[in-house]
Image (tube, rainbow, N blue to C red):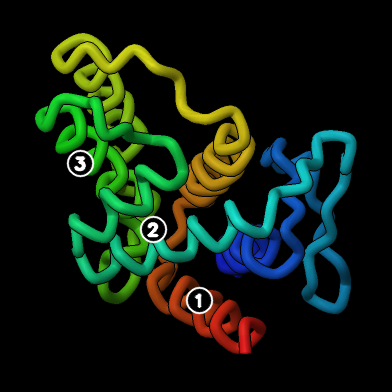
Amino acid sequence: GTATLLLRLVLRELFEFHFVQSDPNFANYLLLRDGRIGLLDLGAGYEAPQSLCRAYARLLRAALREDRVAMRDVAAEIGFVKASDEASAVDAMLDLIELATEPFRQAGSYDFGHSDLPTRVREASMSLVFRHGYLRPPPPETLFLQRKLGGTFLLCMKLRARVDTRALLEEALAGVEERAR
């Protein structure tokens, strides 16, 4: 369905095109007669550095494996955490990453229509700031990617979609490995 197309597109933007149209709202997509989806308003586009896209691929792989050591290493490489951060703040950041990747980590279909993920992410973000004193903003180059991914999840929620997001991610990550050869 449409949600599958939207999710497949965001993964291709990140891992194949390294170009993200960072304003995910229904007015910026065109459903083509042949079943493909077109992107509009490329003025909101962001050319994502390949190194950042590769780091996100490693972060998502680690999240799929629930490997928090690898997640921490990649989160440090991206700039989400620093060596000087308190252990509790690092743990809270890893919890937030796990939460944000929940649709990808679930086996089978993720039910966006019945998910309260945005509320839980907002609460975890507030906890990171107010309970753990994490005041540093995320690296600027990650903001467009997070906006696109989170916004696409919100569109899937509006569509009340059920999507095997894990299978889509695994397919996208296999493509990353294929292109790296």
Q: Quadrant of the C terminus?
A: bottom right
User: At label 3, which amino acid type do we have?
Assistant: Asp
Q: Which residue is mark 1?
A: 173
Q: Residue at x 58, y 77 (%)?
A: 176
* Residue 112 badge: none
Count of picture labels:
3
Within-10-Å neighbours for mark 2: few <14, some 14–19, many 20+: many
Q: Residue at x 83, y 53 (%)?
A: 39
Closer to us: 75 or 144: 75
In terms of sequence position, does the residue under pointer 2 or pointer 3 come before the other? Answer: 2
SS category of the residue bearing label 1: helix
Closer to us: 11 or 33: 11
Q: Are marks 2 and 3 in contact (CB under 8 Å)?
A: no
Res 51 → quadrant: bottom right
In terms of sequence position, does the residue under pointer 3 or pointer 1 come before the other? Answer: 3
Q: Which residue is mark 2?
A: 59
User: At label 1, which amino acid type do we have?
Assistant: Leu
> x, y percentage for residue 88?
10, 29
